[in-house]
Every structure is written in C-alpha cells, then in structure tokens.
Amino acid sequence: MKILGLCGSLRSGSLNAAVLRSAAELTLPPRELAVDPGLDRLPFFDADVEQTALPGVVAELRAAVGAADALLIVTPEYAHGTSGVLKNALEWLVGGGEVAAKPVGLASASPAITGGDRARAWLAETLAAMDARVIPRELRIPQATLRIAGGRVTDEPTLAALAGLLDDLAHAVAEAREDSDSLAS
Ligand code: FNR
C-alpha cells in the first residue's frame, strides 16, 4: 500500500512536516509512505496554462497522486484556513481527477489550542468537492510545540493517534479496493 504525504507548510522547522516525518517512520512494510518533495515547486494554478502547456512538475504531481493508494495531508492553519501552497496544489489536481475516490487522511498541528481544526474543516470541504474519500478519523495536534520537538512527534498519545490514523487509512484503502472489485465484477 502506497501513501503519498503532502505538507502544506514550507517552513524548515515546520510542525506539520514533523508530523509527516513521524508518520513515515511509523509506516512499516508492506505499507510505504513517500513524502512529496515540496509543493512550492508548483507554479500558481492557471487554467490557461493547464489547457495549453501543462507544466512538467504538475504532470509529475498528478502521476504521483495517481500512483498512490492514499494521501496523507498535513496542514498548517493560516488565517483560519489551509495554506495557499496546499490549496494551489489541490487546484492543479482538480483537472487531473486523480484525487477522486482516493482515501485521504487529514492532520493538522498548531501552537494554538484549536489544533488547526478550521484548516482541516476547510480542506475537507475542498476535498469533498474533488470527490475524495476523506476518512472520518482526523488528527488534531493542539499546543503542538509541546508535543513536537527536533522535527519529530515526541508525545506518545499523539504518536498513537497518528498510528491510528494510518491504520484507518489502510482500512479505507482496503474498502476502496473491495468497492472497485465489486463494481468490476
Ligand atoms: C498563523 N498561525 C495560526 N495558527 C492557528 O491556529 N490559526 C490561525 O488562524 C493561524 N494563522 C496564522 C497566520 C499566519 C500568517 C502565520 C504565519 C501563522 C500560527 C501557525 O499555526 C504556526 O505558525 C504553525 O507553526 C504553522 O505551521 P508549521 O509551519 O509549523 O507547520
């Protein structure tokens, strides 16, 4: 099972990138978690460019998303929403259709007590518009500076919750496969 991790923060000391790093370390064969190299490589979405000359980096992102069985998206909360880089990436992915029916797990880390709840809610709405299968379990990490250090999640209950999110994502992949098998037969 291949999971692709997307991070909405570009900051070198990102709390959310640390969540993705820890998720990769919790993922053992036969599961794999590959972290996207950085959504800042994408140009701003432009429907004219999409129609006339799709940038190679966008085609690569679409292919990576298409090849993944599931997505794990971690988002910072900026001004009560998700980040511009993440929304921009999703806009490029609308036209490709690779996100449709794809199981998606959401996590957010914030120094605030609200844990990025509004950013995840915002993302879930966008992903619903793209027909993604956002799994019911989400991971909120409030007061994240107390739970993340040295680029890793250090808080045991948070690590357990992250492992639970990955398990639920794996179950969603199995369910999606059963659904497509029963449609094919
Ligand atoms: C923030 N931050 C923030 N936090 C939050 O919980 N709700 C919010 O609406 C905002 N808004 C916001 C706007 C801007 C412009 C900045 C720079 C920051 C704080 C934010 O959660 C914090 O910087 C996180 O550490 C960002 O995530 P990464 O980069 O650590 O993953």
Image (cartoon, rainbow, N blue to C red):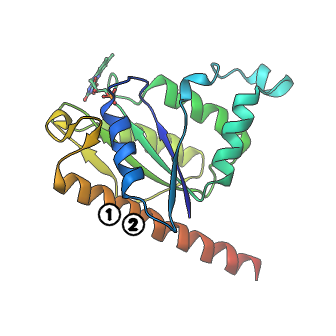
Mark number, residue 77: none
Query: In the image, is the residue at mark 1 within 8 Å of ligand 1 by its beta carbon?
Result: no
- Please state if 142 lies on the left or on the right of 123 as rendered: left
Query: In the image, is the residue at mark 2 within 8 Å of ligand 1 by its beta carbon?
Result: no
Query: Considering depth in this image, is 117 or 5 the residue closer to the camera?
Result: 5
**The N terminus lies in which quarter of the figure?**
bottom right
Q: x and y percent of residue 75 in the render? A: 39, 36
Mark 2–mark 1 distance (CA, rounded to whole Å): 5 Å
Please name the residue shown 25% across and 33% down the image.
110
Q: x and y percent of residue 65 in the render? A: 63, 47
Crowding near pointer 2: few (<14 within 10 Å), some, many (20+)?
Answer: few
Please name the residue shown 47% across and 43% down the image.
125
- The residue beneath circle 1 is 164
Instruction: Find residue 94 and report its image quarter.
Output: top right
Q: In the figure, 31 relative to 115: above or below? A: below
Q: x and y percent of residue 136 in the render? A: 38, 60
Marks counted in the figure total: 2
Tell me the element at label 1: helix
- Find ligand 1 in the image and state its quadrant: top left
Q: In the figure, 184 relative to 119: above or below? A: below
Please name the residue shown 65% across and 23% down the image.
45
**The C terminus lies in which quarter of the figure?**
bottom right
Answer yes or no: is residue 88 visible. Answer: yes
Crowding near pointer 1: few (<14 within 10 Å), some, many (20+)?
Answer: some
Q: In the figure, 119 relative to 132: above or below? A: above
Identity, as a three-letter code, of the amino acid under mark 1: Gly
Please name the residue shown 39% across and 66% down the image.
167
Answer yes or no: is residue 114 visible. Answer: no
- The residue beneath circle 2 is 167
Instruction: Find residue 88 and report its image quarter.
Output: top right
Q: Are marks 2 and 1 in contact (CB under 8 Å)?
A: yes
Q: x and y percent of residue 9 in the render? A: 41, 28
